[in-house]
Amino acid sequence: MRILVVEDDWITAQMLTHALEAFGYSVTVAEDGDEAYQYVRSGEFRLVVTDWEMPGMSGLELCQRIRSRSSGGYVYVILLTSYTGVENVVRGLDAGADEYLTKPFTTEELAMRLRVGERILSLESRDMTIFALAKLAESRDSETGEHLERMREYCRILAEELSTHPRYREIVDGEYVAQMYLTSPLHDIGKVGIPDSILLKPGKLTSKEFEIMKEHALIGGRTLQSVAEQHPEASYLRMARDIALTHHERVDGGGYPVGLRGESIPLCGRIAALADVYDALTSKRVYKDAYDHAIAKEIILSERHQHFDSDIVDAFISREEDFLSVSQRYQSEVVESITNESLLTNA
Amino acid sequence: MSTVTSNTTLTPLTSAQVLDLPQLLERCLGDLAFAERCLVKFQQRLQADVEQLQESVNAGDTFEVARIAHLIKGSAATVAAMPLAETANAVEAAARQEVSCDAELVTATEVFVKEVKRFMDVVPMFSTIG
Ligand SMILES: [Fe+2]
Ligand SMILES: [Fe+2]
């Protein structure tokens, strides 16, 4: 992994380089903040160790500039400083530093800070990989637009709301909410196993075709199950499996692939079911216009105890404003990109 | 009065170890040859920096004094020359005082230069170990 060391003092830069190379990093040294910022802009560095006090742009300003960039992946910044005390720690954090290393550094502390940084960066790339995979699977199905983006927002809103409910407080914590957001885009990953002739068919499916279409839940569930077995420590994979397998189950037992009832459907599957249906209702499809929120709400309410878990319907009702704003936000983004495109063609 | 205080806090340092060898070796991951190269390089720079520092003290350029002392403090701490780092810190602090006190700066510089000399005497001894 590449690492950028920003240090105006030659000896400290040398010693950091020596230690970091021994740890297996490939090191680039910048002598001041401006030079460092140019390196960061190249996009090749995701780990930065920077001195605080330097001539020209200080380490603190460098942090601020790195954070104000909107492009690229997250850059993990460790601030090297001889400043101690709460006030300085707060200043550094405000500027966007992730960690501190006190000067003169010890290699033990350096190694520890880097381990944390690498872990955080690997989580970020994991999250992006999962979403990219989901997008790839969805890309064959061209009409769904920003379905996955909205879907994970709806799932997060519902899970957040349930976490305030005494019955769910024990199960739905911050971690659960985050995992719901992370894994819900994978719900239709099994569609990669459905032939084009059915997946992309413009008209209504015959009942035989619909039976094949339904298999996407089993295919996705099985695929994620085998990955989850190989990585038993990764609980999010089990949630991903449950969502893929059960997002078309109904609490009245009329869903597929198994026909599970009520609470035998995993909670995450029950949450994903409502989020998925709400988005299908409020989005335009080849065979239908987008329903507005009021109609979608009416349909969901009428399916309480049938398709949907009543607690989740209640959560939806308490947070309907948030649902509406998510659906509007993504709609306005679509409109905006269309407008931009037409501006370009006019020019 | 403050001159006296800073003097008394600095006195015990002169008897302290010039170099904290275990600390330096930790920072070099036990690589003695590398530690030696760093010390030699540091020593070469120190010589030039001290001359510049003394000139700036004589010229009354406290801004420049503070800048040089700060740099020396940082690299001295990195090579684990703790008394050197602390005496350099005292010079920096004296140079940064809002109301400049020449006597204090001069005294701090004297203490610092004495420490530099002690350091210069010890480093070649260390080099022969490696
Ligand atoms: Fe589905
Ligand atoms: Fe879906």
Image (cartoon, coloured by chain):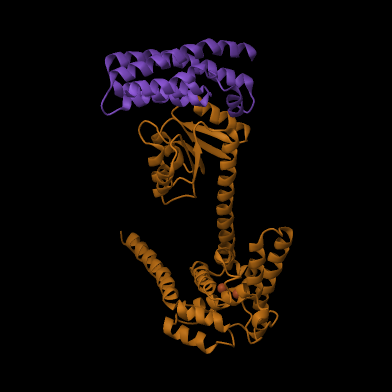
Task: Check the picture and name the quadrant holding the N terminus of chain A.
Answer: top right
Residue at image coords 64%, 87%: A252
In this view, which residue lies farthest toward the bottom? Answer: A302
Q: Nearer the viewer, residue A300 or A8?
A: A8
Task: Identify the hue of chain B.
Answer: purple
Q: Nearer the viewer, residue B87 or A21?
A: B87
Question: Could one spot residue B50 in this view of the protein?
Answer: yes
Horizontal relation, residue A214 to residue A51: left or right: right
- Quadrant in the picture for residue B34: top right
Task: Check the picture and name the quadrant holding the C terminus of chain A.
Answer: bottom left
Horizontal relation, residue A76 to residue A22: left or right: left
Asked if residue A343 is positioned above or below residue B68 in the image, the reply reads below
Q: Nearer the viewer, residue A298 or B47?
A: B47
Q: Which chain is orange?
A: A
Asked if residue A76 is positioned above or below residue A337 in the image, the reply reads above
Horizontal relation, residue A344 to residue A209: left or right: left
Residue at image coords 51%, 82%: A314
Residue at image coords 49%, 31%: A29
- Quadrant in the picture for residue A57: top left
Question: Could one spot residue A195 in this view of the protein?
Answer: no
The x and y percentages for residue A210 are: 64, 81
The x and y percentages for residue B59 are: 27, 15
